[in-house]
Image (cartoon, rainbow, N blue to C red):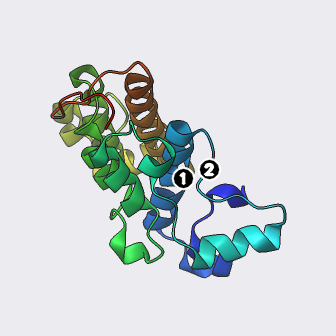
Amino acid sequence: SPLYMAPEQLSTAQKVAPASDVWSLGAILFELCAGAPPFGAATLGELRRQILFEDAPLLRKIKPEVPRRLEAIVQRCLQKDPARRHEDVAAFAEELAELAPVQARDAVGRIQGILQGGVAGERSESRSRRSGRARRASLRGGARGALLAGGVVVLGVVAAVALSRGKAMPGEARTEGV
């Protein structure tokens, strides 16, 4: 959907890279927290112009109760320059996990394992026994990307649910009226 397309995707499909997925997941997380996507327009041409040339709005201007750290993570995802975003979905998940409850942090290890060619939930010792070819064949491009994206979205949903319930994020004191 164009609402979640990175600027480079709107310019040319040849520039699409892992950082493009980070943009899309950042846009989804923005919407989970704010209740609307970061960019919206009546026409596709106007939406394209916004994504290519306007900065994403600050999340705390829309939802002041969003933790500053979460706002910074989302803003990094929505940088126009892919080099200024997280390197890949695993790096994004690792930073996002800092805000998630302890129970949800295991997802980061699974995301990193998938990115390295393992299967979700597989123990590292059994992964090391498998041949490189078998490991690569176990989970190919599209499925791996879908699992990675799903893991990050789960972390984002956990953070958004905790936020909506008024719980302080780990490492952040809850303050009223901030």
Q: Which residue is drawn at 57% across and 76% down?
A: 8
Q: Who is closer to the viewer here, 107 or 83?
A: 83
Assess disc 2: are there few (<14), some (14-19) or many (≥20) residues with their C-alpha within 10 Å of its C-alpha: some
Say above or below: 44 vs 110: below
Ranked by sequence position, the earlier of labels 2 and 1 is 1
Q: Quadrant of residue 4?
A: bottom right
The amino acid type, in three-letter code, at marker 2 is Pro
Left-right relation of 87 to 145: left
Say above or below: 44 vs 168: below
Q: Which residue is drawn at 33% across and 32% down?
A: 177
Rendered image: mark on residue 99? none
Q: Quadrant of residue 36?
A: top right
Left-right relation of 161 to 100: right
Assess whether mark 1 and mark 2 are in contact (beta carbons under 8 angstroms).
Answer: yes
Q: Where is residue 173 in the image (x, y as percent from the top left)?
A: 17, 30
Regarding mark 1 in the picture, which secondary structure is present there? helix
Q: Where is residue 48 in the image (x, y as percent from the top left)?
A: 71, 72
Q: Position of residue 6 (x, y in %)?
A: 57, 67
Q: Which residue is drawn at 77% across and 72% down?
A: 46
The amino acid type, in three-letter code, at marker 1 is Ala
The reply to whether residue 95 is visible in this rendering is yes
Q: Which residue position is annotated with label 1?
A: 27
| Quarter of the image where the N terminus is located | bottom right
Q: Nearer the viewer, mark 2 or mark 1?
A: 2
Q: Where is residue 126 in the image (x, y as percent from the top left)?
A: 22, 32
Rendered image: mark on residue 37? 2
| Quarter of the image where the C terminus is located | top left
The reply to whether residue 143 is visible in this rendering is no
Left-right relation of 132 to 33: left
Inter-mark Cα distance, 2 to 1: 6 Å
Q: Residue at x 69, y 77 (%)?
A: 49
Q: Who is closer to the viewer here, 86 or 121?
A: 86
